[in-house]
């Protein structure tokens, strides 16, 4: 018997297989969960397809109420969810509690959004109205860095728009998603929300199925390309929130100490495992040494520990495969630059690395050009603003970026030149449910969050009526 079951057709069910979940802070199994076969994936899709016509006819106000009830249930189970989240993902308990609060807040905002009919023309010649209708069954496929929050990012807009959903969490972080399924079972009609797990072997099965009308995916660019190819035959609607190599550009007029704290927080949130985190910091030559020294001081002072330990600020890398990738990046950083803080593999159980600051690197070095997705921050020197903008834009990614300056207008003028879906001034990773989030280039396709994100879960329908003679 597994510790956590899947939700299929309104029932909590065992899997045809089972799967152990590893705590990345201990490398020990802390839970066994149900794992789906293709047969069970088919059952989940069929349950969602069967439930769709009835759910699409439920008034928007009732759908909003259900989503609000899910937010209430998350609050009622917040402590239990946060502890499980830390155990499966590794992040410090305070960050896990923050993720729970964000999940609640996003759901509450989704529950306020309207899907309004719009009249383009209403005169003697004709009537033209634009409506938005649900698409059908949505497949939600999510990454392991924010497993509860991103699950709510998929479920909320999908069901508000009148769709049904089959959600598949990452194999290394399935627990909080399955716990969310327990809550959904008691709120939504059978089949509206289905949650299954796999061992990275059912994504293609879901995306290729003709009953799936849309795929909402959060994860790596490489996997996003595979999903896009798999969905091509059916011309499925896609929202792809993919990787980033987000630059932070620090101008020469900043308060070094205050800015270093902002840069550090944005680079090492969730052990650096954030698609929008600062992955490369460009610092003006006149303050480069001072900024490197201050970032190094912050890194050396950070408390790295099991996320359940009192005072932990940075937890482990989430899984062994990513741990090995980041260790390779660490060796490349040591080869190409100068490590001024961290660079150490901690001698203990768990996938721990100390936060690492590497200076004297530049564009063309692997640690700068590629997304490390771990606790390493390269700091790159620049002297010319036109040059640094060109270097920031040379990346194939364009998810997030930031500009730091004591002169807001100056910062905004630079920000306007950055090719990125989100560009912040004097902050980073400042997201919210009311703010559209979109990637450019290899960082994604479509929009998440806000009214624009909700529209991605609908089909535009135009009613055009002739009047008069």
Image (tube, helix red, strand yellow):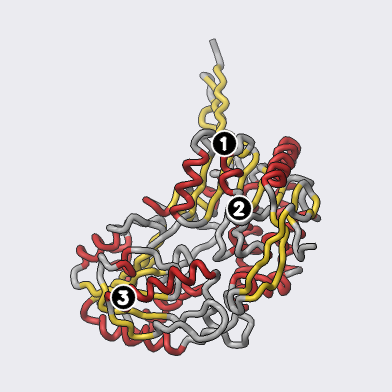
How many labels sit on residues?
3
Q: Dot 1, crowdedness within 10 Å: few (<14), some or many (≥20)? A: some
Taking the image as drawn, is residue 56 in sight? no
Asked where in the image residue 129 lies, by quadrant, the reply is: top right
- Is 189 placed left or right of 151 in the picture? right
Q: Residue at x 53, y 77 (%)?
A: 351
Q: Position of residue 221 (x, y in %)?
A: 44, 54
Q: Which residue is mark 1?
A: 459
Q: Regarding mark 3 in the picture, which secondary structure is present there?
A: strand
Upstream in sequence: badge 2 or badge 3: 2
Q: CA distance from mark 1 to mark 2?
A: 17 Å
Q: Position of residue 468 (x, y in %)?
A: 55, 13
Q: Tell me whether circle 1 and circle 3 mark residues in contact (CB < 8 Å).
A: no
- Is 213 placed left or right of 438 in the picture? right
Say which mark, if any, is on residue 284: none
Q: Which residue is mark 3?
A: 379
Q: Tell me whether circle 2 and circle 3 mark residues in contact (CB < 8 Å).
A: no
Taking the image as drawn, is residue 6 in sight? yes
Q: Regarding mark 1 in the picture, which secondary structure is present there?
A: strand
Q: Decide: is 233 above or below 10.
A: above
């Amino acid at each position: 018997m597994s510790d956590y079951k899947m939700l299929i057709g309104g029932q909590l069910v065992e899997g045809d297989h089972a799967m152990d979940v590893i705590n990345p802070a201990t490398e020990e199994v802390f839970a066994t969960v149900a794992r789906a076969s293709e047969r069970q994936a088919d059952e989940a899709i069929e349950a969602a397809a069967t439930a769709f016509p009835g759910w699409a006819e439920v008034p928007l106000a009732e759908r909003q109420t259900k989503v609000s009830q899910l937010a209430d249930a998350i609050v009622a189970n917040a402590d239990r969810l946060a502890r499980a989240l830390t155990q499966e993902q590794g992040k410090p308990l305070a960050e896990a509690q923050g993720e729970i609060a964000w999940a609640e807040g996003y759901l509450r905002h989704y529950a306020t959004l309207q899907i309004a009919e719009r009249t383009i023309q209403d005169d003697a010649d004709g009537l033209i109205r634009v409506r938005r209708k649900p698409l059908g069954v949505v497949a939600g496929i999510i990454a392991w860095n924010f497993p509860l929050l991103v699950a709510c990012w998929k479920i909320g807009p999908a069901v508000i728009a009148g769709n049904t959903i089959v959600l598949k969490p990452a194999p290394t972080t399935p627990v909080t998603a399955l716990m969310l399924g327990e809550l959904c079972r008691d709120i939504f009609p059978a089949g509206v929300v289905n949650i299954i797990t796999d061992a990275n072997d059912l994504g293609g099965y879901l995306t290729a199925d003709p009953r799936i009308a849309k795929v909402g995916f959060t994860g790596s660019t490489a996997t996003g390309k595979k999903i896009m190819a798999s969905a091509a035959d059916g011309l499925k609607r896609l929202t792809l929130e993919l990787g980033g190599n987000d630059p932070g550009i620090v101008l020469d007029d900043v308060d070094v100490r205050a800015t270093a704290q902002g840069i550090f927080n944005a680079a090492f949130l969730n052990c650096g495992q954030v698609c929008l985190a600062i992955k490369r910091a460009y610092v003006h030559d006149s303050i480069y040494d001072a900024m490197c020294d201050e970032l190094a001081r912050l890194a050396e002072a950070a408390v790295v520990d099991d996320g359940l330990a009192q005072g932990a600020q940075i937890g482990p890398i989430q899984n062994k495969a990513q741990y090995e990738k980041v260790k390779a990046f660490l060796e490349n950083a040591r080869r190409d630059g100068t490590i001024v803080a961290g660079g150490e593999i901690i001698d203990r159980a768990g996938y721990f690395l100390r936060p690492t600051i590497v200076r004297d690197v530049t564009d063309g070095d692997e640690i700068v050009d590629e997304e490390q997705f771990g606790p390493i921050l390269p700091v790159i020197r620049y002297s010319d603003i036109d040059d640094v903008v060109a270097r920031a834009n040379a990346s194939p990614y364009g998810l997030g970026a930031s500009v730091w300056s004591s002169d807001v207008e100056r910062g905004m003028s630079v920000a306007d030149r950055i090719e990125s879906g989100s560009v912040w001034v004097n902050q980073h990773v400042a997201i919210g449910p009311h703010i559209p989030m979109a990637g450019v280039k290899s960082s994604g396709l479509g929009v998440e969050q806000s009214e624009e994100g909700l529209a991605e879960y609908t089909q535009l329908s135009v009613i055009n009526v002739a009047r008069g003679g």
